[in-house]
Amino acid sequence: MLRSLTTRDKIIELGRDFVQKLGYHAFKYQLISKELNIKNAAIHHYFPAKEDLGVAIIEKDLADFQWMVRSVGEKSAFERVNALIDVYRTYQQESKNLCVIGACISAYVEMPEKMTIASKNYQDTIYNWLVANFKQGLDNGEFHFTDTPEDLAALWLATLPGALQASKARGKGYFDQVMSQLSGSLQVAAQ
């Protein structure tokens, strides 16, 4: 998969992979340079500071989220929000202990300002998308829940990264249990 990408794109992809497996503070340019068999200076050419790469990783993850949103745009509200759960299932299956949002949250107070702004914008995008889907599902009778769509979106946005991180210690069964609870929080109407 990395073969057809530019060097810059490969750096971003590997950086994201390391951030998701190790966390923002634990990953270093040396890990990427070793994997790509390039010098650290080559990475600094594209990303002079770690925060520049951090912002690029957040932007890439946001772009992937937006691609997912477009790919499920014609599906039911339930299928759309469960596509987000499927993204997290894939992370868990690939032993990625953090999503990019979770990595940013855990390092938030120590991150450079450009990254905190990019991270908040990304979180806001997901939150607003969830709210819109929850409202639509509620309005069309597909969902039945008593919380506000905003409260439910806040719950999902906190739970998805948290369950992924906790599954490292608690295992796949725990992760699946939490994902089942998230889907159940919508109290899907009988078909």
Image (spheres, rainbow, N blue to C red):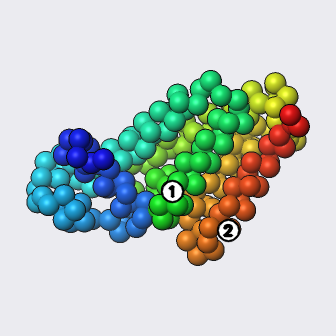
The disc, 2 or 1, on the residue closer to the chain's N-terminal end is: 1
Q: Which mark is residue 91?
A: 1
Q: Amino acid at mark 2?
A: Gly
Name the foreground residue: 88 vs 15: 88
What residue appears at the point 46 percent right and 53 percent down from the top-left corner?
100
Residue 72 picture quarter: top right
Left or right of residue 135: residue 62: left
What residue appears at the point 56 percent right and 53 percent down from the top-left corner?
88
Name the foreground residue: 18 vs 158: 18
What residue appears at the point 12 percent right and 52 percent down from the top-left corner?
42
Q: Which mark is residue 167?
A: none
The answer to whether one can see residue 38 in this image is yes
Q: Amino acid at mark 1?
A: Tyr
| Secondary structure beneath label 2 | helix
Q: Position of residue 3 (x, y in %)?
A: 22, 46
The answer to whether one can see residue 112 in this image is no
Residue 60 picture quarter: top left
**Residue 139 sits above or below residue 18 on the image:** above
The C terminus: image quadrant: top right
What residue appears at the point 27 percent right and 48 percent down from the top-left corner?
2
Residue on which the image places disc 2: 173
**Residue 17 sits above or below residue 128 on the image:** below
Neighbour class for label 2 at 10 Å: few (<14), some, many (≥20)? few
**Distance from Cα at disc 2 to Cα at disc 1:** 14 Å
Left or right of residue 25: residue 92: right
Q: Position of residue 1 (x, y in %)?
A: 30, 47
